[in-house]
Image (cartoon, rainbow, N blue to C red):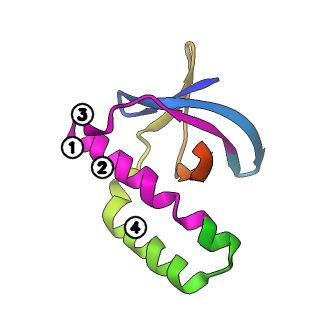
């Protein structure tokens, strides 16, 4: 099990369940308090809105999907285009990019 961080803020735990290069995925259990700061509220909003993508992908409903992706890029680029995400396992740490949160506490990352 990994601990997920954004900068020095622990966001939750991740249990990797699979992958298909370059993507990996697993179960996500949040441990942060969304109301604690502006940053945690921003991350909580990103988690909530990114989960809206996957039902649209599965339904192949591309017009609203593209609109949602544009909104996510406009509002959350600071969380997407960054090297500040990492997974930690004891003394080992790996940078990850583009974490996307899905319904049912799933996460995918590169």
Q: Which residue is mark 2?
A: 42
Q: Which residue is mark 3?
A: 36
Image location of residue 109, percent across then percent down:
60, 47
Q: Alpha-carbon neighbours of circle 4 within 10 Å: few (<14), some, or many (≥20)?
A: some
Whether the residues at callouts 2 and 1 have beta carbons within 8 Å, the answer is yes
Q: Quadrant of residue 55?
A: bottom right
Q: Which residue is mark 4?
A: 73
Q: Nearer the viewer, mark 4 or mark 1?
A: 1
Nearest to the observer: residue 95 or residue 100: 100
How far apart, in angstroms, are the residues tagged by discs 1 and 3? Answer: 7 Å
Q: Which residue is mark 1?
A: 38
The earlier-in-sequence mark between 3 and 2 is: 3
Mark 4 falls on what kind of element? helix
Q: Alpha-carbon neighbours of circle 1 within 10 Å: few (<14), some, or many (≥20)?
A: few
How far apart, in angstroms, are the residues tagged by discs 3 and 2? Answer: 11 Å
Which residue shows up at 75% across the image and 51% down it? 21
Q: Nearer the viewer, mark 3 or mark 2?
A: 3
Which residue shows up at 41% across the image and 40% down it? 84
Visible residue check, residue 29: yes
Whether the residues at callouts 4 and 1 have beta carbons within 8 Å, the answer is no
How far apart, in angstroms, are the residues tagged by discs 2 and 1? Answer: 6 Å
Whether the residues at callouts 1 and 3 have beta carbons within 8 Å, the answer is no
Q: Nearer the viewer, mark 4 or mark 3?
A: 3
Residue 18 on the magenta span:
no
Q: In the displayed orientation, state which residue is furthest to the front.
A: 104
Relative side of 99 to 82, left or right = right
Which residue shows up at 55% across the image and 13% down it? 91
**Relative to 100, residue 58 above or below:** below
The earlier-in-sequence mark between 4 and 3 is: 3
How far apart, in angstroms, are the residues tagged by discs 2 and 4? Answer: 13 Å
Q: Which range is magenta?
A: 25-54
């Amino acid at each position: 099990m990994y601990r997920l961080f954004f900068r020095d803020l622990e966001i939750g735990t991740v249990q990797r369940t699979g992958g298909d290069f370059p993507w990996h995925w697993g179960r996500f259990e949040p441990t942060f308090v969304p109301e604690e700061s502006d940053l945690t509220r921003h991350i909580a909003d990103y988690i909530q809105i990114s989960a809206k993508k996957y039902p649209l992908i599965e339904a192949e409903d591309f017009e609203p999907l593209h609109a949602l992706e544009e909104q996510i890029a406009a509002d959350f680029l600071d969380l997407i285009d960054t090297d500040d995400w990492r997974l930690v396992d004891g003394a080992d740490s790996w940078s990850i990019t583009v974490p996307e949160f899905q319904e049912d506490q799933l996460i995918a990352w590169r």
